[in-house]
Amino acid sequence: MKKRILLVDDEPMVLRIMRVALAKEGHQIDLAADGVQALAQIEAACPDVMVTDIDMPNMTGRELCLHLQENMPNRKFPIFISTSLAALHHRDWSKAIGNLHFLEKPISIRQLTRLIDQYTGANSPSEDLAP
């Protein structure tokens, strides 16, 4: 089932590779280079899934997730955080945020596609959750 996926990363090459691979799977892809742009994208059209990096300028992935938790506590779309920070103490901040999952870099597109299917099932887009 086609999903609207918001990819958030400040590395253009990462965005390009993920966009091409996920679009080939039939998904609609929206892009953002930081958390500020991601919030604007979410306001315009709530995604079915968000995949975000942590280290970005202007608003980090961590700040983005905490902002969403505070301002959209009933958010239904899953958030996948791509990170190379594997230690658990780097993830302490995320304990209070529901439906958030860590993916260690490098991310396998096959694994990501499988997780998107697993966490979204046959649900329809969450358009009613826009802030």
Image (spheres, rainbow, N blue to C red):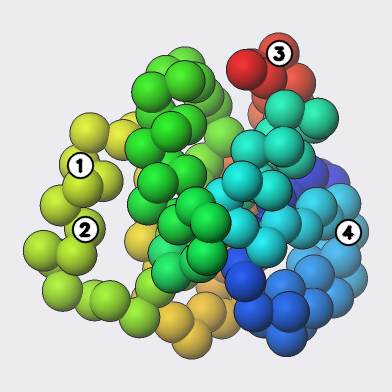
Point 69% across, 48% down: residue: 37
The residue labelled by disc 3 is: 128
Identified by mark 4, the residue type is: Gly
Identified by mark 2, the residue type is: Arg
Residue 108 position in % (x across, y down): 56, 81
- Quarter of the picture containing the C terminus is top right
Q: Residue furthest left?
A: 89
The residue labelled by disc 2 is: 91
In this view, the mark in front (4 or 1): 1
45 above or below 104? Answer: above
How many neighbours does mark 4 have within 10 angstroms: few (below 14), some (14-19), or many (20 or more)?
A: few
Q: Nearer the viewer, residue 41 or 73?
A: 41
17 above or below 96? Answer: below
Label 4 vs label 3: CA separation?
23 Å
The residue labelled by disc 4 is: 26
Point 38% across, 23% down: residue: 70
Label 2 vs label 3: CA separation?
29 Å
Q: Is residue 24 left or right of residue 99?
A: right
Label 4 vs label 1: CA separation?
32 Å
